[in-house]
Image (cartoon, helix red, strand yellow):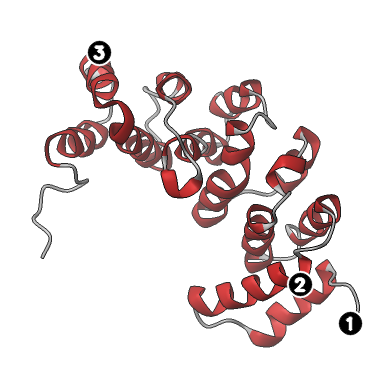
Amino acid sequence: MPALSADEISSQLRRHRPPSTAAWRLLRRRWSAQLFDEAPERVIGITAELVSKGSWDRLTAYELVAAHPGGIQSLTPAAIGRLARGLNDWPSVDTFGCCVAGPAWREGRLGSCCIDKWARSQDRWHRRLALVCTVALNVPARGGRGDARRTLQVCRQLVDDRDDMVIKALSWALRVLVRWDRDAVQRFVDRHGARLASRVIREVSTKLRTGRKSGRVQR
């Protein structure tokens, strides 16, 4: 069987036109299985080509890196920069932050200076990305083990941001941290309450009080 390439993955995506996320993920898992024994550097090279080919290709690239056994540990800042090119929508930013950049930061493959640079960016998607990267520090399903210091450092930088995409990500970052250090989150809300968007205060306070984003009872 010929080696899997970025062009072949992209061609299969166009041919199958996955009708749903579940159908797409079946394809991605098949490609991950084919690439399992490949050198992580080659997989990263394939994914760097994929990100410029289309939206599904980009999402596929990020999950291929995350699923490969040596993918995250083989990332370099330069490779992460290549994978980040063209980020300009909610799904790609969140997938990249949760699957690639956040885990790379957590595992020491990406420095905090890069996260800080994204947080200071004029680009709303980069600012959202900085916050989404903290999710990988705190969600056990993403490998998170809890990191209040780094999470709150990013949150402090964006406490005055009023872009809707950033506000939603700030709420998310704080709510995820509640699992590990609810006292630190409460102190953050108390200290910065006058500057935080009302949505952040409402959702985070509800999470602290009920354990849920919304106060509505789930049936």
Reply above or below: 44 against 23.
above
Question: Which secondary structure lies at badge 3?
Answer: helix
Crowding at mark 3 (Cα within 10 Å: few <14, some 14-19, many 20+) = few
Whichever of callouts 2 and 1 sits on the residue coming sooner in the sequence is 1
SS for tag 1? loop
Of callouts 3 and 2, which one flags the residue occurring earlier in the amino acid sequence? 2
Check residue 171 in the rendering and tell me which mark sits there, or answer none. Answer: none
Residue kind at label 2, given as amino acid type:
Gln
Q: Quadrant of the N terminus?
A: bottom right
Q: Residue at x 49, y 38 (%)?
A: 128
- Closer to the camera in the image, 91 or 140: 140
Q: Residues within 10 Å of mark 2 (few under 14, many from 20)?
A: few
Q: Residue at x 40, y 27 (%)?
A: 161
Percent position of residue 150, x then y: 48, 22
| 208 relative to 146 in the view: left or right | left
Residue wearing tag 3: 191
**Circle number at residue 34:** 2
In the image shown, does 17 or 161 lie closer to the viewer? 17
Disc 2, disc 1: CB below 8 Å?
A: yes
Disc 3 residue type? Arg
**Which residue occupies the foreground of this view, 43 or 16?**
43
Q: CA distance from mark 2 to mark 1?
A: 10 Å
Q: Quadrant of the C terminus?
A: bottom left
Q: In the rendered view, would you say 69 is above or below 25?
A: above
Residue situated furthest bottom in the rendering: 15
- Identify residue for label 1: 1
Identified at 63% across, 68% down, the residue is: 56
Instruction: Spot the residue most to the top.
Output: 191
Q: Specify few, some or many for label 1: CA neighbours under 10 Å numbering under 14, 14-19, or 20 or more.
A: few
- Judge from the rendering whether residue 197 lies leftward or rightward of residue 132; answer left or right: left
